[in-house]
Amino acid sequence: MTAQDAYKNLISHFKENTTLASVNSVLEWDQDTYMPSAGVDHRSEQMSLIGRMVHERDTDPRINDWLAACESSEIVKDPISVEAVNVREWRRMYDLETKLPSELVEEIIRTTTKARQVWMEARKKSDFAMFAPWLEKNVELNLRKADALGYTDDRYDALLDAFEPHAKTAEVVKVFEGLRKDLVPLVAKLKDAPRRPDIGVIKRPYDVKKQAIFAEMVSQRIGYDFNAGRLDITTHPFCAGLGPDDTRICTRWYPEDLAEGLTGTTHETGHALYDMGLPREHYGTPMGDAISSGIHESQSRMWENQVGRSRGFWEYFFPVARGVFHNEMADITLDDMYAAMNYVTPSYIRVEADEATYNLHIMLRFELEVALVHGELKAKDIAGEWNKRFKEYLGIEVDKDSNGCLQDVHWSAGYMGYFPTYALGNLYAAQFYAAANKAIPDLQEQFARGDFAAMLDWLRKNIHSQGKRYRATELVEKVTGRPLSHQPLIDYLYAKYEPIYGITR
Amino acid sequence: MTAQDAYKNLISHFKENTTLASVNSVLEWDQDTYMPSAGVDHRSEQMSLIGRMVHERDTDPRINDWLAACESSEIVKDPISVEAVNVREWRRMYDLETKLPSELVEEIIRTTTKARQVWMEARKKSDFAMFAPWLEKNVELNLRKADALGYTDDRYDALLDAFEPHAKTAEVVKVFEGLRKDLVPLVAKLKDAPRRPDIGVIKRPYDVKKQAIFAEMVSQRIGYDFNAGRLDITTHPFCAGLGPDDTRICTRWYPEDLAEGLTGTTHETGHALYDMGLPREHYGTPMGDAISSGIHESQSRMWENQVGRSRGFWEYFFPVARGVFHNEMADITLDDMYAAMNYVTPSYIRVEADEATYNLHIMLRFELEVALVHGELKAKDIAGEWNKRFKEYLGIEVDKDSNGCLQDVHWSAGYMGYFPTYALGNLYAAQFYAAANKAIPDLQEQFARGDFAAMLDWLRKNIHSQGKRYRATELVEKVTGRPLSHQPLIDYLYAKYEPIYGITR
């Protein structure tokens, strides 16, 4: 078989497989939005059937032959050509999918199904001891998974790599340590700042129907295409790609909080803008796919925070919001709103945390995960260690395990290696945004005029259109001119918070 | 292989296949409700991929071996046992699916795709001559299809059988002739009746949101389970089975018409109640599936007409409706509403036709189809023949082809044999309803108290729970004690219309 023929086979095989996998996205979206409650059992049968079919096709042994034919050919000579990138990433995926023994996969599913039930019960009772044995089992399974996947330097690398390809634990540790050193004092300063925003301007009754209308206006204005997507209501906000021209977002509305629904929308719009900007002609191949969880999160966080909580954004949208919420906002000024959107306060629950404290939540989890994987910490000691570090980083005492180490689903579901991608996303976002500001110095003035096109074009050109051409760290360096650093995020936070809170660096 | 093992293989093969096919129902439902417009191309790729997979599995040659092992065994001794029914129906399906040569299937798809485009254009221009050559092609393809499927008495049988299994053209012709003879004079009498309902009580502004609330109340009250379904908005009302516990209905609302949205809801609720009443334990096998298009239509028409346009129904729901539409209905009495819900008038468009004239529309189409298939009529002469019969049956002159033979999509889509199932559904419904009234003499009093449980239980026991155990005509005879006849429908219509219109038989 010629390399050309092998490559053609790979293209058509994976395009069809992507189409099949996208069917599961439809099933999942429907489950999280409109499916009637009794439909859940059959839905899980539909999804596991499709999932099994996708897995069978993803591990088809012919893939190995086709890849081998390409890998030894001229096709991959230029390492960043479309063909070379696709072959590289297919190889990576094929190896990952074929390395895990099916017994291990099944054991993980069995164990996490039970672990999740125990976790829900334990969280309800706020009783970590109840969950500890299951956390231990999940750690052990993750160790076996890491060993099956393989690693060179660090066992945690294997787990991290599944979500953030090619990321190295040692590098993440280094960047996070720098970030923590600067972030802990900033959070402390903000806590005792001379001025603090009045969160009451956001936390008051806001008509829910108007919230939805306003959020759709915002989403459309910043670039979301409602002909190729829609906004629905769900429990946990998400963005789903149901096809190359069908990227849907979901959020939820609180009748006494303007920010939750709105930032849920700008966040998911950010994810969607990435998917909508991937090169259409490469759909179904790695060149048409997103780089990593971290880079994806950088896009959602940038639109949510760097754009959606910026002064320029609110200069444009405040009068619009006043028109929509004429009763609710009668007594509120632009300054009030801008400050309240940037309200910072240490709190227990990660998903409710603000832009500044959020990363401390992530770092804490990451450090504990690494210690568990390295065998430096026992599962049973997690609660104590959690509470100790929480006090250190955020300055508050954890009152109960359900507000502490039992709050997140990830460990019960067996996910280890995922948490750091949240903070990486924030770091990437700040660094990208700094570079965008250098390239387009009047970005905030543009936002203030309601013009977000240059921002989006810059992201499209530098990030979205690249598909998986570069690794995440390569992309960061290529786009921003320097390696990943925590500095841009810290600079950005101080620049924003100094005037609002009256603090100094 | 033992017959037991073969049967087990068939069960698991077809259960999985049904699950796979149900995925396409989700895709289709989404396409008709919430899918953004740009998603259409990828959606059709998803659906054709799943469709291809289902077809491959439905025609897996192992099925033939498994069936053969069962067919020669004790398993099928009792012809109405679960096993015998399943084997009989799987055989029927397997033979049907394997008989059509794939070249013919592809030619049908190619031709109908074009024919449909031409039809849309021709309908817009109201120019039958433009469409005639494509109708001719479609007739020819249907003849080839009939020949491939095979028949003993009548070529049209093969086409009819695909939608109404085991139905015979000669029998349908006979029943329809009797029906026509009685229906034409009834429609004429109603047209010139001494009293006629004031349709204005229905055709006036009705708040659309309230219409949806009222229709949901009705649907729930007559037995629809909103935990296992939902009601959404679409262009053409439909009912979709997304899984054994997920049966969704869709309708549309007109701001100046109360009846369209409501009867769309009761009609689709009828379809859904059938699906919801199929034996859950047999899901994925013929014993858990509906008998035929005609029997399915009988359930929708019964709830829409025999129940939903009855005096008892409105005795209960009129005060409820008055509560919901307190402004809209301030000047309307129960008698006004009941009469208006039974407004009859000859009209051009089938889908807008009332309960009495509807069947004449169907018969006309059926007679022309049969004549085309028998070669007694040429495609080019359809418009003339249509108009002639339309005047004869409905007493009005067709003013243009778009109001005549160009109105329906079926012929352009290549469907022949489907139309008669609509009228069969009406005949079955009337005959079932007469039997139900004999079994439960106070049905109308029960409806007047808002109690629809006995009606639904009767349908569940006699029809829904039987799955495909009996053929349609067998079921009718078993449940009603006599063969299919047009008499119950005529009796029912006279009983209803005499007091409303002041006519006599």
Image (cartoon, coloured by chain):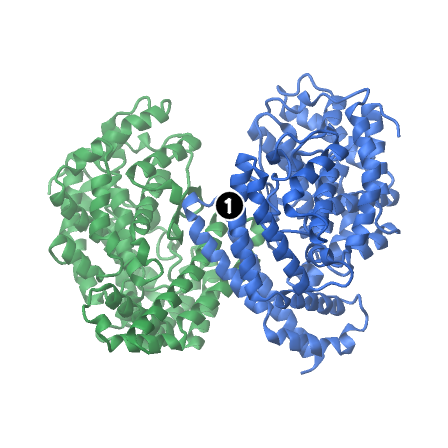
Chain colours: A blue, B green
Residue A61 position in % (x across, y down): 60, 75
Does B33 sit above or below residue B291? above
Does B195 sit above or below residue B160? above
Q: Residue at x 24, y 33 (%)?
A: B339
Residue A108 seen in render: yes
Residue B332 position in % (x across, y down): 29, 25
Does A259 sit above or below residue B243? above
Q: Residue at x 67, y 48 (%)?
A: A378
Residue B485 seen in render: no
Tell me which chain the residue with mark 1 is part of.
Answer: A
Residue A89 position in % (x across, y down): 71, 65
> How many numbered marks have been drawn onto this rendered protein structure?
1
Residue wearing tag 1? A117
Q: Residue at x 65, y 37 (%)?
A: A351
Towards the viewer: B278 or B5:
B5
Tell me the amino acid under the disc marked 1. Answer: Gln
Give residue A143's quadrant in the image: bottom right
Residue B430 position in % (x across, y down): 19, 48
Towards the viewer: A339 or B308:
A339
